[in-house]
Amino acid sequence: MKRLLFIATLAASASACVNGNNPVQLLDARPVDSKTCERSEKAILRGSLNYNVNTHYITTFSVFSPLTENTTSGSGTGFYGEEVDLSYTAKKVTTTFTDESLPILYVVPAGAQPGDSFFTVDLIGDEARKKLEAVVPSEPDSMTLLVTIKLKGKLASGKAAETNEVTFPIEITRGASCPPNQTPMPGAEDKCFPGQDGVAFSCG
């Protein structure tokens, strides 16, 4: 199994349109299962987050590479990711965000297939988190954060290259939480990511 993985702690939809000329293409978004902390088999169209419980949003993106091992196009036979770029747009609140970038090392071999090639990333960067702290509304109101992501790097030939962009929406609100002297933790049946995509939480 080609589990291509990096955790981008910067701190997309399931039917995303991709540019066929990109040497690596980001495809569907698949959440991390809260019970196993492993990648889910099912793609999702949008995420949700209780910002009183969790200020991170962790998901995975499937990866496809149309490059071939013996390509003669001069484009090389692999992609070396060096940077993940995130940009943001908010709906239902008024604010602006700074684009964020994180250096990475991420190698995608030629011919990588979306069924077994993916990476894991925190879609909410440090600067975005600071902005959200001031604007996320309380229930029953909510806001939508549109996160656009792409990877930049180079081919084996040394030529600069980047993936397509995908945009993943996250519905964010401030819902129920814990008392000030307690910390939200995963619920009894969950192991990770309380407050994300409806995952239950307990206080401790």
Image (cartoon, rainbow, N blue to C red):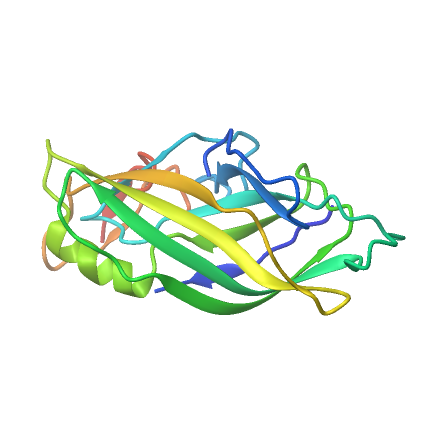
Tally the marks. 0
* Quarter of the view holding residue 62: top right
* Quarter of the view holding residue 11: bottom left
Query: Which is more toward the observer, 56 or 154?
Result: 154
Image coordinates of residue 188 in percent, x first then y, are 34, 39
Q: Residue at x 68, y 41 (%)?
A: 116
Answer left or right for 76 relative to 196: right
Q: Residue at x 54, y 57 (%)?
A: 151
Image coordinates of residue 77 in percent, x first then y, are 80, 57
Answer left or right for 189 relative to 201: right
Q: Residue at x 34, y 55 (%)?
A: 124
> Image height check: is 89 above or below 103?
above
Q: Residue at x 25, y 57 (%)?
A: 97
Answer left or right for 131 relative to 105: left
Q: Is residue 38 visible?
A: no
Image quadrant where one finds the C terminus:
bottom left
Q: Is residue 198 visible?
A: yes
Image coordinates of residue 1 in percent, x first then y, are 74, 46
> Image height check: is 15 above or below 37?
above
Answer left or right for 167 relative to 29: left
Image coordinates of residue 194 in percent, x first then y, are 32, 45
Query: Which is more toward the observer, 172 or 111?
Result: 111
